[in-house]
Structures are given as C-alpha cells and as structure tokens.
Image (tube, rainbow, N blue to C red):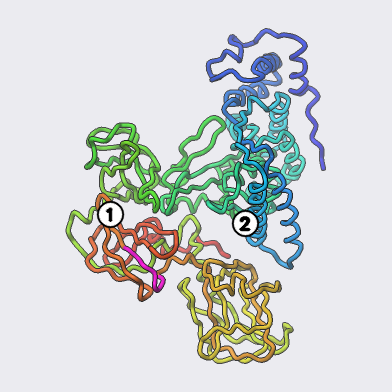
C-alpha cells in the first residue's frame, strides 16, 4: 500500500509554528471578530493565528481559503454520540456476515444483508435489555475536532485534488464544496479515515488517466456490496460511522451516501448528496438520498441502496419528485430543475382564505396516515391566489394552509403538466357519474424503481421445467416452459403433458434475475405436492419454511441463474406448477374488506365491499374525481387514483408509462 506523507512545508508545520510567535493579523479584522462567524467557539484564537500564518505565505493561499471555508460552519456541524453503546453489535455482525458468505456456494448481496440485519437487530435488542439507556449527545465539531486533524484533512484534500487527472475540469468552488469538507452529513468524524481511503483507493488516480470516470466510480461502488435498509427496517439509533458501515454493509440511504461520498472525495472526485424529502406518489412520508459526482460536462447520480451501480439522471426525469435539494457544506439548494421538468404556476384560493397567512400556503401530496403531507411552500401569496415556482410536474397536489396546527384545503386537488397547465379534480361539483372497475389499491409500478414490479412478473416467463430419474445434468430433459404469465397473483400453470420423474428442477435464464415468492409442484388434481425428500435453491438445501414454500406471498427470493430442485423417494407424477412472482400483495384479495372514498373537501365514502372476485365494481362514482381504495383487512400500501373514461383506474405518474419499457433494466 502506498503511504501518503504530508509535504515538508505543511500546514501542520505552520500550525506548530503559530504558537511560537504571536503574529499580527494580516487581515483587517481578526477571525474571531468576523461577522460571518455566528458564535465564538473552542480554539477560535488558535485558528485565528493559523489563518494569519497561512495568509502571510502566498504559496498556501488555497490552504488559507480552505480553512476559512470550513471554519464558517464548524460550530454548526456535528453528530449524535451514543458513547459506543452498540459497538459490540457491529463487531458481531461483521463476523457473522463473513461467516455466512463463506458458508454458501453462491450468495446474493440481498441474502447476506437480510441475514446480517436479523443478527444485528437481535444484538441491539440484547444490549437495550441488558444495559441502562444512554441519552444521545450532540457533539459540535468546533468543540471536539482538533485543529491538527482539521488541517490534515485540508492537506489530504489538496493532495487528492492535485493527483486527480481530471482536476482541470473542476473549479475551486467545486473543490471547496465537494472535495474539501471533513464530513458529508452527521456521521461521526474519524480523523484517520480520509488518509485510509486515500491509501486504499490510490489505484483510482492511475485508472482515471485511461479509464472513463463512470467506469471507475462503478468499480468502486460495486465492490462495496452495500444495500440500504428502509423505514422500519432501519435499526440504527444514530448515524453509523464509516467504520461501522464497513462492518454491516447496510444502513439508511443517507448514511450509505455519506460513506460513498467520503470515499470519492478522498481521491479528489467532487461529489455530494442530493435528496428528495418526500416522493409525490408514495403512501407515506418518506424520501430518498443519493450520490452525485461531477463529470467533465455535468454530473451523474447513483441510486444508493441497490446492490449494483445504477445512474438515475434519466429515470428521474419521469419520476414523481416534487422537490430535489443538494447538500452544500453551508446550506441546501433547490436543484429540482436539474432532474426533471419543473413549472411555475398560480393557483386560485377558493376556500378557507380567512385562515390563510402569506407564509402558510403550501402544496401537499397524499399521505395514507396524514391524509395530506406538505412538500413545498408558495413563493408569493395574496388573498385570491398563490404562486409556486420550480415545482416538479405530473404529480397530484392539494393547495393547503395551516391554521392552529391543522391543515385546511384551499382548492380542489390538481395535476400540473410539464407546460404548467392545471387540471383540477373537481368532479363532485359537476354531478356527473360513471361506473368503475377496481383492481388494485396501489400503483402497479413506480417509475423511479424502473417498473421493477413489472420486471418481476416477466422474470418467471421463460422458466424451464426439467425432469430426470438420476440426479445428473446429462439425464435431465425439458418438460415445459412457463409462458404468458402477466399477473403477480398465484398462478396454476398446467403442463402440456403429465411428467413422472424422481427429480424435477426449474431453470431460469442465465445471467438474469428471477423473482419468485411461491413455488409448488402440482398433482393431476392441481393440488400441491409436498412430500418431497429434499429441495435446493441454487444448490443450497432449503426446508418447508423457505421463502418459496412458506405460503407467504410477501417473502421472496431474487436469484441470478435461478435453479430450484425437488427430489422424491420414488417417481412422482406432476401435471402443473403453482407459481407466483415476487408480489406487493396490492391486488384485490378474496375475502378482504374494502372501502372506496372520493375527495370533496374531505374524504367521502362510496361504500364498503367484501371482495368476492379479483376486482371490485362500483356504480355511479363521480367523474373527474380523486379516489382512495382502503383495505380494512390487510396491507399498508394505498394511494390515490383517478378513473378514466373506460371506468379503469389511472395512476398519475405511472399509468402514462404503462407501455414504456425503455426505463426497465435488462436483467
């Protein structure tokens, strides 16, 4: 490993010398008295002397400006410290992760993550039960980061900048915001980590001389084998450190983003975090963070949390993103227009105007738990109308105001297109009706996920059932190929002819992912055959409670080069296959109780039905209205939709791309 040494005439030397002589400031105003320093903090006088020393040395102008830049917000940056309470859990999960990977022939990052996550949660629970709770303490950078460590960070950032063959494409402003900072988010500061990354990824500098930047970043990302854990699955009590993420290889999208950005910055690649605080077509208040890095001509963004490198610049042009922000060192800026078409528009204020204040007119999106969730505020307001700027298009919004901590609507919900044209869903006021056929309670796919739900369904088409009486590759014969599956429901696929064999296996396409939640062989009465001797998934033995045999549609397996094998003690006659692709279980389920509502200044019920078939029929529903189907029996995901002229559900932000498969990944 190549060792990185600081220059002889280094900042650390300047730092040491500054204590020997009390220098007069080379600036008109000493640092500690500058107006842009909001409050005085620890080591302020020390930094003032260092700045003065650097200011006198013309060759160190970049170091001087870098230190100035970091000090402006040093007393606002920090992290939550839990006193190392959960350190034991990170050590344990790292060992178990390695052990699990070594124990199986072929592993997926998803499987390793789920195994590690389950162990990690058990460790956290054990620690919580056996120790006294500790109050997380906010540690401010200006109070605990030593000047020598901050100065070393600056020196290493400058070394990386100078070694990066692409440095001429980046400005000093890019360097200050996206290479220099000692931290990305609120992860714990580890003073030795930047040097460690610089040594570990030293190969990047040579690679960038001959290899495209995207290829280099892809190599870095794919080797990390990270996956995000979302919402309730995220077990972390505080933001993990970079070393802790190396132990788990899973965390929230924001924590994983910080980790990758720290690596990229360590080798001089300007990068940072962009985030959408709240998606426009999701059922609850959740957003997403991801990594961007600057290129010769712009920037590329990586969808953090997947098990593989994937850029999102193109797919986010079509996705439901009300707002996107970029994290700079000292503030966040609105970059929605860099990702998708945005619009400026004015909306009339019809109701509750007496409750309206100029600072409290907003746009909200649907939320299953809140009814409506505020995502952005008006740029300008008067009593008759509100103006909104730089708003993500093709999303359903509701203009609202906040009065005494409650939300009040100001007009009907509406959709705004990319040209700024507004379509209000004011059907209840028109007294026009139609019949509706309801098949789902949540959109069949999300554009931002590249129609992944559709890919999962299609992944089981092309699976080949083979049979043999001796368990050797050369004895297996093709029996049938699964075709024309178009639903995520359980399907009973009838074979062309009955096959009687001791061994059966289902083979997926090479180098492609097969996504299955349930899989059974069926007898001549199309009933499940469950007296097999043993079964194996990709050569790893499974039991009756595996994801494919547990009769739970919400458990699943995603496997590349899928192969599932059954072995029987004697010949077994098979006439069909019971198979279900990985599913969200948002179809109409027999026996579940549903209620359809429409919006007319509040949610109004159109009646409750118990599902007798795989769809619901509602007669005389108001045209040009907004609807919400609730399942009172099961499930979580529910979202609003409209009804088109054919009486079918239309999901704004998704249905427009029903026939567009260009966004789907080729796996």
Give the distance between the C-alpha atoms of the residues marked 2 and 1, in whole angstroms: 40 Å
Alpha-carbon neighbours of circle 2 within 10 Å: few (<14), some, or many (≥20)? some
In the rendered image, the vertical position of residue 470 relative to residue 216, given as above or below = below
The residue that disc 2 covers is 307
Q: Is residue 181 left or right of residue 527?
A: right
Q: Nearer the viewer, residue 118 or 497?
A: 118
Which residue appears at 46% of the width and 57% of the height? Answer: 447
- Magenta includes 591? yes
Q: Position of residue 87 (x, y in %)?
A: 71, 44
Secondary structure of residue under mark 2: loop
Query: Any mark on residue 415, and which?
Result: none
Q: Is residue 455 left or right of residue 213?
A: left
Q: Nearer the viewer, residue 275 or 339?
A: 275
In the rendered image, the vertical position of residue 329 relative to residue 622, given as above or below = above
Q: Position of residue 613 (x, y in %)?
A: 36, 76
Tell me where the magenta segment starts and ends, as one range. 589-595
Q: Position of residue 406 (x, y in %)?
A: 33, 41
Residue 431 appears in the picture as rendered: yes
Q: Is residue 318 left or right of residue 234?
A: left
Choose the circle earlier in sequence order: 2 or 1: 2
Which residue appears at 50% of the width and 59% of the height? Answer: 450
- Magenta includes 312? no
The residue that disc 1 covers is 599
- Where on the picture, by quarter, is residue 361? top left
Q: Position of residue 170 (x, y in %)?
A: 61, 35
């Amino acid at each position: 490993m190549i060792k990185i040494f600081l220059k002889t005439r280094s900042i650390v030397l300047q730092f040491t010398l500054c204590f020997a002589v009390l220098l007069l400031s080379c600036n008109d105003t000493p640092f500690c008295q500058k107006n842009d320093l909001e409050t005085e903090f620890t080591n302020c006088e020390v930094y003032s002397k260092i700045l003065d020393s650097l200011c006198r040395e013309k060759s160190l102008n970049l170091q001087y400006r870098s230190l100035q830049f970091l000090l402006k917000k040093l007393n606002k940056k920090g992290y939550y410290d839990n006193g190392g309470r959960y350190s034991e859990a990170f050590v344990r999960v790292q060992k178990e992760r390695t052990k699990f990977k070594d124990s199986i022939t072929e592993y997926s990052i998803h499987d390793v993550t789920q195994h590690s996550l389950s162990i990690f949660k058990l460790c956290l629970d054990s620690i919580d039960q056996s120790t006294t709770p500790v109050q997380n303490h906010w540690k401010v950078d200006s109070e605990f980061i030593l000047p020598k460590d901050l100065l070393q960070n600056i020196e290493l950032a400058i070394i990386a900048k100078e070694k990066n063959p692409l440095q001429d494409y980046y400005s000093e402003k890019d360097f200050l915001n996206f290479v220099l900072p000692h931290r990305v988010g609120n992860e714990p500061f580890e003073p030795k980590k930047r040097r460690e990354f610089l040594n570990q990824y030293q190969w990047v500098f040579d690679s960038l001389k001959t290899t495209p930047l995207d290829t280099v970043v892809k190599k870095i990302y794919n080797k990390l084998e990270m996956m995000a854990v979302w919402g309730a699955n995220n077990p972390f009590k505080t933001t993990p450190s970079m070393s802790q993420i190396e132990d788990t290889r899973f965390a929230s999208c924001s924590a994983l983003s910080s980790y990758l950005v720290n690596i990229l910055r360590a080798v001089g690649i300007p990068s940072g975090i962009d985030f959408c605080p709240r998606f426009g077509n999701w059922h609850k208040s959740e957003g997403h963070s991801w990594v961007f890095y600057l290129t010769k001509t712009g920037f590329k963004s990586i969808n953090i949390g997947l098990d593989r490198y994937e850029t999102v610049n193109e797919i986010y042009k079509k996705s439901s993103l009300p707002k996107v922000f970029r994290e700079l060192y000292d503030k966040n800026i609105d970059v929605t227009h860099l990702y998708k078409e945005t619009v400026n528009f004015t909306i009339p204020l019809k109701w509750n105007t007496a409750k309206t204040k100029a600072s409290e007119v907003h746009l909200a999106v649907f939320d299953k738990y809140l009814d409506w969730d505020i995502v952005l505020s008006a740029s300008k307001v008067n009593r008759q109308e509100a103006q909104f700027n730089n708003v993500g298009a093709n999303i359903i919004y509701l203009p609202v105001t906040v009065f005494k901590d409650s939300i009040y609507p100001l007009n009907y919900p509406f959709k705004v297109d990319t040209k700024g044209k507004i379509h209000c869903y004011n059907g209840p006021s028109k007294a026009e009706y139609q019949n509706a056929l309801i098949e789902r309670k949540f959109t069949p796919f999300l554009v931002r996920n590249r129609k992944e739900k559709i890919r999962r369904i299609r992944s089981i088409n092309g699976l080949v059932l083979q049979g043999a009486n001796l368990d050797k590759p050369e004895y297996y014969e093709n029996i049938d190929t699964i075709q024309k599956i178009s639903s995520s429901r359980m399907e009973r696929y009838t074979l062309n002819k009955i096959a009687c064999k001791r061994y059966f296996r289902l083979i997926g396409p090479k180098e492609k992912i097969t996504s299955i939640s349930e899989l059974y062989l069926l007898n001549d009465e199309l009933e499940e055959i469950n007296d097999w001797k043993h079964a194996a998934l990709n050569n790893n033995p499974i039991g009756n409670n595996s994801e494919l045999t547990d009769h739970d549609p919400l458990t699943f397996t995603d496997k590349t080069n899928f192969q599932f094998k059954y072995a029987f003690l004697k010949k077994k006659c098979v006439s069909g296959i019971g198979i279900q692709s990985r599913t969200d279980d948002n179809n109409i389920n027999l026996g579940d109780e549903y209620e359809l509502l429409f919006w007319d200044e509040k949610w109004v019920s159109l009646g409750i039905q118990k599902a007798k078939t795989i769809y619901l029929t509602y007669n005389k529903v108001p045209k040009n209205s907004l609807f919400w189907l609730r399942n009172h029996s099961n499930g979580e995901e529910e979202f609003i939709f409209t009804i088109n002229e054919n009486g079918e559900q239309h999901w704004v932000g998704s249905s427009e791309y029903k026939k567009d498969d260009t966004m789907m990944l080729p796996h």
